[in-house]
């Protein structure tokens, strides 16, 4: 599945190539309780069809009407604001006091959307710089933060997979985790040196490697935008990855298994050159305690915990004394 940002860019490129006039809209500033964050995008076709969102719907309706009536930027980008007054906030369905500012950009050849899509498809992080005065676009190698900058003269946006997820193992549970993670805009790298599993891997928009887990973790040079989840149930593979990952700045490191097995795993890790503080970073049993049992439910629990930590939300496991442990068989795990 595509992220919303990617869906918007794909629609803009396809419609433009088919001969339609297309406008890209990007939220560049918000004040108060705006319904969508800075960086939210949408593409609107001349006949009113749209993909993406910049509000709860009412702003989109007004934009469609304006574009249908010819009030779109024909040649150069322009800005527009919604919710400046209490009356407008009510009219456009914005929360009380909410205000947002958009950049509306006509899609032309020099917009370079196909080039941007090609870079994203190659898992490259790139920065797109839009000159508001000329409409010219420049695409350069990217950085991870900030995701958007706007000073009234230039709109600078970061595109591509802003976070990486390394999944150790290519079993059934890994398929659900990888699919959900790609929808959350992760670049998913699946490590599976076992041929019987690697040969069957076919999850779209993921990268498969047959390297040994420790070699992969060292090669990737994990940063604070990286996460690692070990899902093989094989200590020889999972522990190899954890020994390197726990020494890295990765924001999330999790391992599947029961509480008993994770306690044993921590004992094994303590025999190597890992400090107590490094071992304490391990999330195991992996994921939030949701009572999850099926692979899909477990994947939800894992991604929920990862999302909370990525967004700076403290999580605390609340396993009760009689709660079932996470079994060694992923099909019957409880998270």
Image (spheres, rainbow, N blue to C red):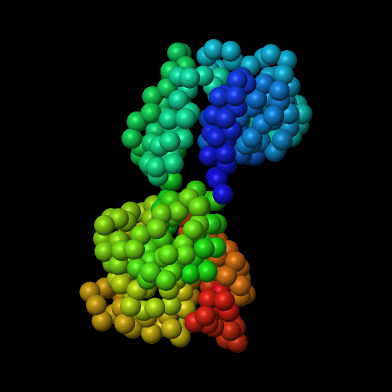
Q: Quadrant of the C terminus?
A: bottom right
16 or 287, which lies in front? 16
The reply to whether residue 321 is in sight is: yes
Residue at 39% over, 78% down = 234
Coordinates of residue 322 in the picture (x, y in percent):
60, 87
Q: Is residue 70 left or right of residue 323?
A: right
Residue 38, placed above or below residue 301: above
The reply to whether residue 334 is in sight is: no
155 or 173, which lies in front? 173
Snapshot quadrant of residue 25: top right
Snapshot quadrant of residue 31: top right
Q: Is residue 237 left or right of residue 159?
A: left
Snapshot quadrant of residue 297: bottom right
Residue at 26% over, 73% down = 274
Residue 112, placed above or below residue 162: above
Coordinates of residue 176 in the picture (x, y in percent):
55, 63
Coordinates of residue 13 in the picture (x, y in percent):
54, 29
Coordinates of residue 183 in the picture (x, y in percent):
55, 51
């Amino acid at each position: 599945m595509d992220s919303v940002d990617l869906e918007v860019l794909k629609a803009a490129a396809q419609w433009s190539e088919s001969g339609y006039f297309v406008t890209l809209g990007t939220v560049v500033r918000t004040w108060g309780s705006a319904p969508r964050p800075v960086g939210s995008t949408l593409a609107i076709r001349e006949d009113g069809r749209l993909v993406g969102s910049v509000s709860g719907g009412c702003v989109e309706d007004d934009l469609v009407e304006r574009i249908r009536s010819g009030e779109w930027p024909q040649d150069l980008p322009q800005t527009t604001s919604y919710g400046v007054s209490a009356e407008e906030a009510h009219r456009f369905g914005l929360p009380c006091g909410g205000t947002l500012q958009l950049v509306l950009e006509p899609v032309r050849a020099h917009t370079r959307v196909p080039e941007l899509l090609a870079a994203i498809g190659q898992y490259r992080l790139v920065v797109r710089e839009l000159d508001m005065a000329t409409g010219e676009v420049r695409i350069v190698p990217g950085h991870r933060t900030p995701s958007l900058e706007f000073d009234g003269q230039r709109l600078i946006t970061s595109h591509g997979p802003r976070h990486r997820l390394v999944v150790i193992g290519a079993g059934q549970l890994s398929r659900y985790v990888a699919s959900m993670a790609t929808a959350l805009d992760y670049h998913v790298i699946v490590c599976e040196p076992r041929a019987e599993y690697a040969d069957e891997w076919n999850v779209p928009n993921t990268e498969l490697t047959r390297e040994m887990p420790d070699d992969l973790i060292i090669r990737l040079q994990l940063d604070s935008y990286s996460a690692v989840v070990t899902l093989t149930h094989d200590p020889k593979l999972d522990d190899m990855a954890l020994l390197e990952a726990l020494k890295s700045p990765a924001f999330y490191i999790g391992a599947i298994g029961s509480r008993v097995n994770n306690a044993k795993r921590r004992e094994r890790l303590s025999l190597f050159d890992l400090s107590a503080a490094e071992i304490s970073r391990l999330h195991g049993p992996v994921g939030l305690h949701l009572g999850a049992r099926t692979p899909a439910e477990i994947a939800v629990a894992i991604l929920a915990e990862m999302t909370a930590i990525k967004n700076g939300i403290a999580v605390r496991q609340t396993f009760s004394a009689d709660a079932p442990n996470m079994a060694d068989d992923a099909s019957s795990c409880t998270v």
